[in-house]
Each structure stands twice: as structure tokens, then as C-alpha cells.
Image: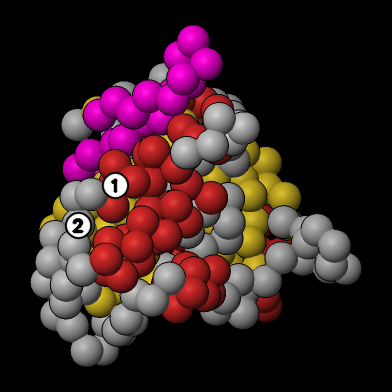
Amino acid sequence: MSAEVNPTTLMKQQVGKAASDRVQSGSIVGLGTGSTTAYAIQYIGERLKSGELKDIVGIPTSFQAEVLARQYGIPLTTLDVVDHIDIAIDGADEVDPHLNLIKGGGAAHTREKIVDCLAEQFIVVVDSSKLVDKLGSVFAVPIEVLPLAYAPVMRAIEKLGGKPELRMGVKKAGPVITDQGNMVIDAKFENIDDPAGLEKTLNNIPGVLENGLFVGVTNLVLVGEVIDGKPNVREIS
């Protein structure tokens, strides 16, 4: 790599490569969303092109992941065709000591949860800033909601003690719209003492499709760090 590459970028590249190295020939791979996962997709494509990997098919978790996979020559399939996923690689906004996650900064958490939960091995790629003692310390919980239900869902979240905000677009007038055509509510909770309970409670609100709490799903976390100006990758399992 060039010495001019920013250490943070280089660290993300190395975390992505470490994840891609765990993909084996003949695998069905869940392709996650986000800047670090994008490097994993790139490296999987490069391994395919070189012949190091063979017979790989990917299942993207977003339009972004689909575009990247096609760009790097990864054949794609769907859940209608396959009956399992061997490995999924995805990012996270927060990771707690029990490897529970908050995801959904890219508004792709519904498809991500479907793919990641089906995978026999789910690998999370993050930088060290995403490690927290308790979920909700920094990020709100993203909640995908049907457009007609966003107002009553926001009221229901307030009754649970959360502070909901409808996510608005950047360089776009109006709210963020997901790949499924829905809205996203970001709900900030002061304390998430029971992530599993809150995950179920939120999903039981009529009009909610899915929320960004991923509890008991992760098998391995690859953490990128910059130490003394040099990138490093460590494992948490």
C-alpha cells in the first residue's frame, strides 16, 4: 500500500481484508453494508479474480452492497434460491462486551438482520470507536417503519421512554427512505439494560418492520485500530 494512504483508511482496508480471508471457496456469502464492509467486498472480488477463490455467490444486504458486488465481479443470488448462508460480513454502529450490536446507520438493518441471522458464521467488522460498555451509549436505535404508521409508532416509542426522531435525508428534501420504501425512526434510550427485551418490544409495535438491535447473533468481531500510527486488527469472540 502507498505510504500516503491515511492510517484510518488503511486500517479499514486491513479489517476488510481480514474478513475476506475467512471466506472459503464454494461459500454463500452475506455481503453487508458500510465503508469497512465495502473493502471486504472488494477483497473477495479480487480473490475471485485471481483464482484464489472459486464458486462464490453473494447475497447483498442493500443496493449499495449489490452495486459493489457487481463492480468487483461477485456473482449474486437470492434467498429464494439458496437454503443457507455460510458466512456473512457486516459492520456495526455499536458493539457491547456481549457482542450485541446496534446497526442501521445506513438504513439497511432490516435486510441485514435477515441475512446475518441466517448465516452459520456472522463476522462484524468495525473500528475501535464502535466498542461500547452498553448499547445506546452513543447511537440511537434505528427502527424501520411503514410510512402510514410513523406517527403512532413514535408515540409508542415515547411511552417506552425513548426519544424518537424521524431520520431526514441529506442532500434530499424529506425523510430517508429505505430500500424497501419505508421510513426510519431513530430512537434514543437513556439506558438499554435489556437489549433482547427491547428488541422484541419494538418489533411488536404495529407498523414496525425491524429495529437495529442485533442480540445474540455475532460470532466474531474484527476490530481495527491505529496504534502508533500503524493499523492493527484484533479479534473478539
| 71, above or below 50, in the image | below
Query: What residue is rendered at 54% in x and 69% in y?
Result: 64
Q: Which residues are magenta?
A: 217-235
Q: Say which residue label 2 marks.
A: 23
- The spot of residue 48 in percent (x, y) is 27, 68
* Pointers 1 and 2 in contact (C-beta within 8 Å): yes
Query: What sort of colour scheme is used for the picture?
Result: secondary structure
Q: Is residue 98 left or right of residue 202?
A: left
Please identify the quarter of the rendering in which residue 44 is found. bottom left
Residue under the image location 78 percent in, 61 percent down? 169
| Residue 195 picture location, percent across and down | 37, 38
Residue 226 belongs to magenta span: yes
In the image, is residue 147 above or below residue 156? below
Please, what is the three-letter code of the amino acid marked with disc 1? Ala
Pointer 1: residues within 10 angstroms few (<14), some, or many (20+)?
Answer: many
State which quarter of the image contains the C terminus: top left
Q: Nearer the viewer, residue 178 or 69?
A: 69
Mark 2 belongs to which amino acid? Answer: Val
Tell me the number on the disc at residue 19: 1
